[in-house]
Amino acid sequence: MFAAFGGSTLLAENTRIIDETFLDELRTEVRTNHPSVGAAQARVRASEAGVRAVRLWEDPMAGISVMAAERQMRRDDGDLMFLAEQMLPRRGLYNARKAKANADRAVFQAELLSAALNLEMMVAQGAVELALADETLLVRSNQVAWLESMAVNAREKLIDPAGSVAEALRMEGELAQERQRLDATLRGRTAFARQLNTILGRPLEQPWPSLALPAPPTVMARLETEFARLATSNPMLQALMRTATSAKADVEVARQERKPIFTVGAESRVYSGGDFREATVGAKMTLPWFNKSVYRANTERALQQALAAERDYEALERKLRSEFVVAYTEAENAAQQAETFFKEVIPRTEKASQATENAWISAKATLLEVLESRRSLQNARLEHRRSVARQQAFLETLRSIIPPAIEPKFP
């Protein structure tokens, strides 16, 4: 992954740009392997089973009893009694429960998508951080190489009687500091790689290839166009919408439960000696009016839950709109900064740095001026790549709020 260069390290040439193809590979991997997605999938499958579990017919009842009495009485009335009952289907309650089960399933499906998008954002932003660390290593490695060559020049200038020992010592000090910064960046890259490996479920020390950020800033869609897709695309909003639908189905369930329950049944008596005595067919009905206040309370509870879900939906929509505007603005600013650094700041700073270095060689500039101009160039290059990374990170935030139209596939 790294090659030695003048006592420091440089990124290998076979770097991989973190484009959509590379990020999609990571998204698929985390969506396939992460346990939180597996848990969400299990909840979806459980809710699908819950839909199939809603039944129209209740289980029939059957019974048998034996009379304990004198022989004559048992012969006259029959000493074996058989019973069969069946509750009649409640079509309205069945439809309401089915609607609630389907709404609950939709909630879990939306939560599955939300969990996947959050993980995809984490892993993509982690890859951006890793790529930025790689590019920072490259910039700092180039700076170390430049300082090493400048230190050699400073020592050669000591041959001149007018040469300054202070300059050589200053260069050695600058070189030591820059090597320390390079080592710190390398340790930071190792930490980013370990974090990504942990999220992806890989071995902690599994190596990563050298990564690079995309060169030009990514073109962004219009804010109004993205806002139009918020309500239909955001999985958290969809989950709350389905929660409201489920609560409304609860209202209908409560209304249906307060209706009477009808049951039909049949009884027969038989003498154990083999003679039939009688048979009775009848119907029964519950009297729900005695618990009228309870059913009214259940209905009120369901209505308030539906109202709360609707208000939660409105509140979350406002919050997501605000977060989207902030992330969109930050991404725009980062793109503009990256473009300015690439087209204006870096070219001019490179020319100024080269001119100052040439002036120092001809004793027309001081070492401090050379170091300051070179430091400005290094900072400009780093800030350019940071701006590109910042835009990519905010684009991933935007993607988690308003995902692409094509939903991800799950195993």
Image: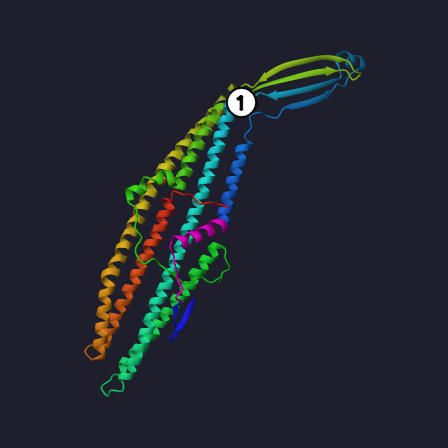
- Residue that appears at 34% across and 43% down: 320
Q: Where, quadrant-wise, is the N terminus in this rendering?
A: bottom left
Image location (x, y in percent) of residue 184: 38, 67
Question: Is residue 32 in the magenta section?
Answer: yes
Left or right: 83 in relation to 328: right
Residue closest to the eye, 338 or 379: 338
Image location (x, y in percent) of residue 405: 38, 42
- Residue that appears at 47% across and 39% down: 108
- SS label for mark 1: loop
Q: Name the residue beneath numbered marker 1.
A: 90
Please say if 89 is above or below 72.
below
Location of residue 86 (image quadrant): top right
Left or right: 59 in relation to 34: right
Whether residue 232 is visible: yes
Image location (x, y in percent) of residue 375: 27, 69
- Residue that appears at 52% across and 26% down: 94
Q: Amino acid at mark 1?
A: Arg
Image location (x, y in percent) of residue 287: 54, 18
- Outermost residue to the left: 364
For the residue carrying disc 1, how many other residues have a C-alpha within 10 Å: few (<14), some (14-19), or many (20+)? some
Left or right: 61 in relation to 160: right
The secondary structure that dominates the magenta segment is: helix
Please say if 244 is above or below 320.
above
Give the magenta part as a residue range: 12-33
- Residue that appears at 45% across and 38% down: 107
Location of residue 143 (image quadrant): bottom left
Question: Is residue 362 in the magenta section?
Answer: no
